[in-house]
C-alpha cells in the first residue's frame, strides 16, 4: 500500500487538531489580543474545562479592551476629517468581543462583565456620516466632474454609515448628475455597392453593452436623436465607421492525389496449404476545399465637443467559412474511412451575405467593448 496516499489528509488533520487545541496563548504573547480572545473562546466551547484557555481569555480581553479604548483616545486627537470612521471601527471591535464572550456561558466565568459601547457606536456612526456629508457638500460646490464623483462616494458612504442621514440620497443624485460624462454615440454606417446589408445586429449589441456599462459608471451614452431633444451639454462624440469591408470572397482549392492500399485479401490459394492471396487497390482522389472569407476594418473615434480627436483606433475583424468534398476514380477498396466521409459530402452553400457580415463583426465587437471599458475607466 502507498503510504503517501494518507500523508496530505493526515497532515491536515494534525494541523486542525493543533489549531483547535490552541488556547490563544501564542497570539497573546505576540500582542494579537483580539485573536487571542477569539481563539480562547473557541477552545472553551469545545472543552469548557481548559484552565489555560480561561486564563488567556481573561488577560486577552483586558488587554484588547484597553488597546481599543487607547486607540479611540488617540484618534480623537487627530485632525483627520474622517477620524470618526476609525473610532467607529474600534467601538465595533469592542462590541464584537463582548458579543463573542456573551455567546459562550463558560467564558462569562473568565470575563463576567464584557463591556459594550452601544451609544458610543451610534454616535460615532452619526458623526462619521456627518463628516462624509459635509465633505461631499464642499466638493460638490466646486462644480468639477472629479470632485463631484468623489462627493458622490462621500454621500454614499454617509448613507451606509447612517441610513436616511439628512438628504444624503438627494445629494448623491445631484453629485451623480454633476459628475456624469455625456457621450453621443453615432450609429455605424454601412455602405455597399454589391449588397444591401443591415448593421442592426451589431448596433443593438453595442447599445446593449453601453446600457449595462452605464449602470456601473459615471458615463451615459446617448443616440443622436436623444441628444437633439436633450437639454444637457454633451462632452464627447463616439463614432464608428467601417473604412472597408468585403463579404464572401470565395476561393476553391483542388488537390488530386494517387492513393493505394496494399495487402487487401481477396481469397486463398486452391492448394492444400490455403495460403491467403493479396492484391493492391489504386485510384485517384480529388479533394475540393472552399473558403469564403469576410472581413472588415472599423474606425473607432472619440472626439471632444469641439471636434478634437481624443483617441482613435482601427479594429479588424475576419470570418472564414470552410467547406470540403471529394470525388474518386478507381478501386474503392483503396479508400480509408475519412476518404469515404469526404466522398459522401456535396458542395455546400455558404451563409447569406448578411450572416457573413454579422460573423466578421463579432471579433470587432469584442475589441470595441474592451476599448470602451478601458478608455472610460478613467472617468
Image (cartoon, rainbow, N blue to C red):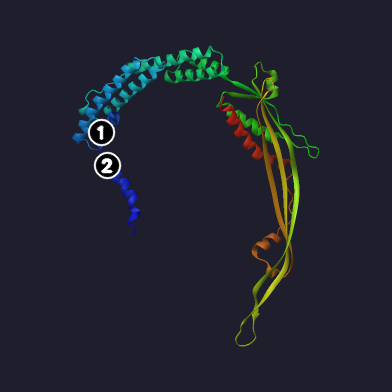
Q: Please say if 335 is above or below 143.
A: below
Q: Local crowd at mark 1 within 10 Å, few (<14), some, or many (≥20)?
A: many
Quadrant of the frame with the C terminus: top right
Please name whichever residue, 147 or 324, is drawn nearer the observer in this view of the structure. 147
Of helix, strand and loop, which one carries label 1?
helix
Horizontally, residue 134 falls left or right of residue 117, namely right
Q: Residue at x 68, y 66 (%)?
A: 335
Q: Position of residue 4 (x, y in %)?
A: 34, 55
Question: Which residue has dot 2 on it?
Answer: 18
- Cα distance between the residues tagged 1 and 2: 13 Å
Q: Find residue 274 and report its image quarter.
A: bottom right
How busy is the neighbourhood of tag 2: few (under 14 within 10 Å), some, or many (20 plus)? few
**Disc 1 to disc 2: CB gap under 8 Å:** no
Q: Is residue 161 visible?
A: yes
Q: Position of residue 244 (x, y in %)?
A: 74, 37
Q: Name the residue at 71% across, 55% down.
A: 324
Residue 315 percent across, percent down from the top left: 67, 36
Residue 103 seen: no
Q: Is residue 117 left or right of residue 200?
A: left
Looking at this view, name the residue that lies furthest to the right. 193
Q: Earlier in the sequence, mark 1 or mark 2?
A: 2
Residue 40's label in the rendered image is 1
Would you say 147 lies left or right of 114 here?
A: right
Front-most of 147 and 175? 147
The count of marks equals 2
Residue ID at (73%, 32%) = 189
Residue shown at 33%/16% (left/top)?
Answer: 120
In this view, 28 is above or below 86? below
Q: Position of residue 342 (x, y in %)?
A: 69, 60
In the rendered structure, find residue 313 and report the number of the disc placed on it: none
Quarter of the picture holding the N terminus? bottom left
Amino acid at each position: 500500500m502507498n503510504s503517501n496516499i494518507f500523508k496530505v489528509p493526515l497532515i491536515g488533520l494534525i494541523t486542525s487538531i493543533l489549531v483547535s487545541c490552541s488556547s490563544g496563548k501564542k497570539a497573546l504573547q505576540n500582542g494579537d489580543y483580539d485573536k487571542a480572545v477569539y481563539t480562547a473562546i473557541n477552545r472553551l466551547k469545545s472543552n469548557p474545562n481548559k484552565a489555560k484557555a480561561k486564563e488567556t481569555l481573561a488577560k486577552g480581553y483586558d488587554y484588547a479592551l484597553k488597546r481599543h479604548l487607547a486607540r479611540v483616545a488617540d484618534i480623537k486627537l487627530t485632525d483627520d476629517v474622517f477620524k470618526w470612521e476609525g473610532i467607529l471601527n474600534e467601538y465595533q471591535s469592542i462590541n464584537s468581543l463582548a458579543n463573542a464572550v456573551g455567546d459562550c456561558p463558560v467564558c462569562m466565568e473568565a470575563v463576567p462583565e464584557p463591556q459594550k459601547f452601544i451609544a458610543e457606536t451610534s454616535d460615532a456612526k452619526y458623526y462619521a456620516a456627518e463628516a462624509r456629508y459635509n465633505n461631499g457638500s464642499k466638493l460638490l460646490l466646486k462644480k468639477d466632474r472629479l470632485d463631484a464623483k468623489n462627493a458622490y462616494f462621500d454621500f454614499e458612504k454617509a448613507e451606509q454609515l447612517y441610513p436616511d442621514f439628512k438628504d444624503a440620497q438627494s445629494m448623491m443624485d445631484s453629485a451623480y448628475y454633476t459628475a456624469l460624462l455625456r457621450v453621443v454615440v453615432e450609429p455605424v454606417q454601412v455602405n455597399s455597392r454589391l449588397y444591401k446589408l443591415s448593421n442592426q445586429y451589431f448596433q443593438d449589441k453595442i447599445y446593449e453593452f453601453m446600457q449595462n456599462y452605464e449602470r456601473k459608471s459615471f458615463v451615459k451614452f446617448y443616440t443622436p436623436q436623444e441628444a437633439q431633444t436633450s437639454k444637457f451639454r454633451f462632452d464627447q462624440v463616439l463614432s464608428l465607421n467601417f473604412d472597408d469591408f468585403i463579404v464572401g470572397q470565395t476561393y476553391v482549392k483542388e488537390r488530386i492525389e494517387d492513393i493505394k492500399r496494399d495487402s487487401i485479401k481477396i481469397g486463398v490459394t486452391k492448394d492444400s496449404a490455403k495460403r491467403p492471396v493479396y492484391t493492391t487497390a489504386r485510384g485517384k482522389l480529388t479533394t475540393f476545399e472552399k473558403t469564403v472569407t469576410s472581413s472588415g476594418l472599423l474606425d473607432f473615434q472619440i472626439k471632444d465637443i469641439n471636434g478634437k480627436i481624443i483617441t482613435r483606433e482601427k479594429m479588424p475583424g475576419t470570418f472564414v467559412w470552410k467547406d470540403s468534398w471529394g470525388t474518386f476514380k478507381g478501386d474503392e477498396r483503396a479508400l480509408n474511412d475519412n476518404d469515404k466521409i469526404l466522398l459522401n459530402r456535396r458542395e455546400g452553400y455558404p451563409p447569406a451575405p448578411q450572416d457573413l457580415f454579422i460573423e466578421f463583426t463579432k471579433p470587432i465587437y469584442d475589441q470595441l467593448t474592451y476599448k470602451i471599458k478601458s478608455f472610460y475607466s478613467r472617468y
